[in-house]
Image (spheres, rainbow, N blue to C red):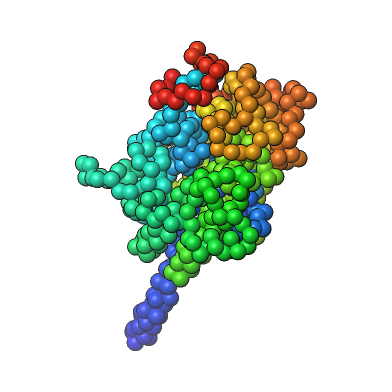
């Protein structure tokens, strides 16, 4: 009996001693398996080669370059040629052709042009299962600051409550800052947005959070701190004479200063994450919403710039860092799209899809961690609208493997030999549908049109494109009975087909 009592006492004491160790191990395991924080930084008008790691040698981007060294860069990442369609694609996970948000909201239509462009959705529907709603339902605190531009207002300033809900609650955001473009005219509100996001991170650090950092920079009109502008003036770059940009002056000290200031702000966010001890399990992604304006930046070797269906308009930098998963100094050549962010975030957070909610992207996790297979071989772009000041008429794209086909529905602006000045009409108007085919791997500058040499490839890719139009319900332009050849781009109207 005495022996049994001593045995039980030892058992109890052993249990007492081992419990703290078990609790610690469970806590450590829980921490290691914790859902990652997500910081998604979307830069306005961000050229593919505007970062040191992507080719530029004239602007200082140490913080972005550090993210590349410690993470990965995608060399063939894509967005849409303009702002609103890209932002809608990110938040909805849908191709703009499917969402109906194919055009910059609040822009008017060209009533005299050869084609009548289709109606567009002017607001991201609040009933959709947005990326923010998906993450919120997965246990995340969701916040954003900066540019909205997918309905109702440009900045993401909180709107008055209605039926107990704020405007951004209806899209799935718990918290929204009030930084607006006009609030800090000296730097496009870069520091306002950054400081608000840092405040949000401080408030949310004890639970998984999603921070959407939506910058107004490097969009025109140009604005940057004077000290940085003077830095580049001393290096021999001209100070701008026109805040909207002049090709002959590019790159101006102002534009280079904007880019460096953006880089500095990103460094502050990274520094905050490190100080809080959150760096190991925080995914940071930086991407552009379209190419930079051609009046400010030369995208060579890419062709054209913002607004164009050529690579300079749609290929953007994409940098991702997540120390827990992504090996440093990784480069990925596989073509990816901003629609892929939705399923990627859904996978890494173990979030659930919503029944009957169509997602067009594919998770990037096989590319990031080397496990599994990334199966998609085709990407599509649909922009059935005019942007004549950027040399753009209604068109669609399909990229399959190394080949890219551009289809223009009924007219084409030939900009060959011209500089990308901001004019009412940039390029010589040519009537009739037009098809171009390029081997992007061999001809990144899209200099050699292969359509006449590879008719079978053209036919194959046109079948893919037409099937995709049908599957997504894409709205297509039609011939304009009121076309005015004397002045096709004079009559601006709010009327849609």
Please determine whether, in this image, residue 436 is positioned above or below residue 52.
above
Please determine whether, in this image, residue 417 is positioned above or below residue 51.
above
Q: Outermost residue, right direction?
A: 453
x, y percentage for residue 61? 58, 60
Q: Residue at x 30, y 48 (%)?
A: 158
In the foreground, 306 or 271: 306
Task: Work out which quarter of the rendered image holds the C terminus and state it.
Answer: top left
Q: Residue 325's quadrant in the figure?
A: bottom right
In the foreground, 6 or 251: 251
Please determine whether, in this image, residue 15 is positioned above or below residue 29.
below
In the foreground, 11 or 131: 131
Q: Residue at x 55, y 37 (%)?
A: 422
Q: Residue 35's quadrant in the figure?
A: bottom left
- Residue 387 located left or right of residue 167: right
Q: Outermost residue, bottom direction?
A: 2
Q: Outermost residue, top direction?
A: 481
Q: Residue at x 45, y 49 (%)?
A: 216
x, y percentage for residue 266? 50, 60
- Residue 25 located left or right of residue 370: left
Q: Residue 125's quadrant in the figure?
A: top left
x, y percentage for residue 47? 59, 47
x, y percentage for residue 419? 64, 38
Residue 375 visible in the snapshot: no
Q: Residue at x 23, y 42 (%)?
A: 162
Residue 10 visible in the snapshot: yes
Task: Work out which quarter of the rendered image holds the N terminus and state it.
Answer: bottom left
């Amino acid at each position: 009996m005495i022996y049994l009592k001593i045995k039980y006492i030892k058992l109890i004491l052993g249990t007492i001693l081992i419990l703290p160790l078990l609790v610690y191990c469970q806590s450590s395991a829980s921490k290691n398996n914790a859902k990652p924080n997500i910081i998604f930084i979307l830069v306005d008008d961000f050229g593919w080669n505007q970062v040191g790691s992507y080719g530029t040698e004239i602007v200082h981007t140490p913080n972005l370059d550090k993210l590349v060294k410690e993470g990965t860069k995608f060399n063939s990442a894509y967005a849409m040629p303009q702002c609103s369609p890209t932002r809608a694609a990110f938040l909805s996970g849908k191709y703009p052709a499917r969402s109906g948000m194919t055009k910059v909201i609040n822009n008017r239509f060209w009533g005299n042009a050869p084609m009548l462009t289709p109606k567009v959705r002017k607001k991201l529907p609040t009933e959709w299962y947005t990326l923010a709603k998906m993450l919120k339902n997965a246990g995340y605190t969701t916040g954003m600051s900066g540019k909205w531009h997918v309905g109702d207002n440009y900045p993401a300033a909180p709107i008055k409550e209605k039926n107990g809900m704020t405007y951004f609650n209806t899209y799935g955001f718990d918290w929204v800052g009030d930084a607006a473009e006009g609030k800090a005219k000296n730097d496009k509100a870069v520091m306002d947005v950054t400081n608000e996001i840092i405040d949000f991170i401080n408030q949310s650090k004890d639970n998984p959070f999603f921070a959407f950092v939506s910058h107004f920079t490097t969009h025109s009109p140009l604005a940057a701190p004077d000290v940085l502008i003077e830095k580049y003036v001393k290096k021999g770059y001209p100070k701008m004479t026109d805040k909207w940009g002049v090709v002959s002056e590019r790159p101006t000290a102002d534009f280079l200063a904007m880019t460096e200031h953006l880089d500095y702000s990103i460094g502050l966010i990274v520094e905050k994450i490190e100080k809080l001890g959150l760096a190991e399990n925080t995914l940071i992604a930086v991407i552009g919403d379209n190419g930079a304006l051609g009046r400010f930046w030369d995208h060579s070797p890419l062709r054209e710039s913002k607004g164009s269906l050529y690579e300079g308009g749609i290929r953007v930098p994409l940098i991702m860092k997540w120390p827990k998963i992504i090996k440093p100094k990784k480069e990925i050549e596989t073509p990816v799209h901003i629609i892929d962010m939705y399923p990627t975030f859904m996978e890494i957070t173990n979030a659930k899809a919503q029944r009957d909610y169509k997602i067009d992207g594919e998770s990037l996790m096989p590319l990031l961690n080397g496990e599994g297979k990334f199966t998609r071989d085709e990407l599509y772009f649909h922009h059935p609208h005019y942007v004549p000041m950027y040399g753009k008429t209604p068109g669609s794209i399909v990229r399959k493997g190394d080949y890219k086909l551009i289809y223009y529905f009924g007219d084409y602006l030939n900009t060959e030999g011209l500089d990308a000045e901001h004019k009412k009409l940039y390029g010589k108007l040519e009537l009739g549908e037009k098809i171009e085919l390029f081997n992007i791997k061999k001809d990144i500058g899209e200099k050699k049109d292969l359509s006449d040499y590879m008719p079978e490839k053209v036919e194959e890719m046109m079948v893919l494109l037409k099937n995709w139009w049908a599957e997504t319900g894409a709205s297509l332009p039609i011939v304009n009975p009121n076309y005015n050849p004397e002045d096709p781009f004079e009559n601006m109207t709010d009327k849609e087909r």
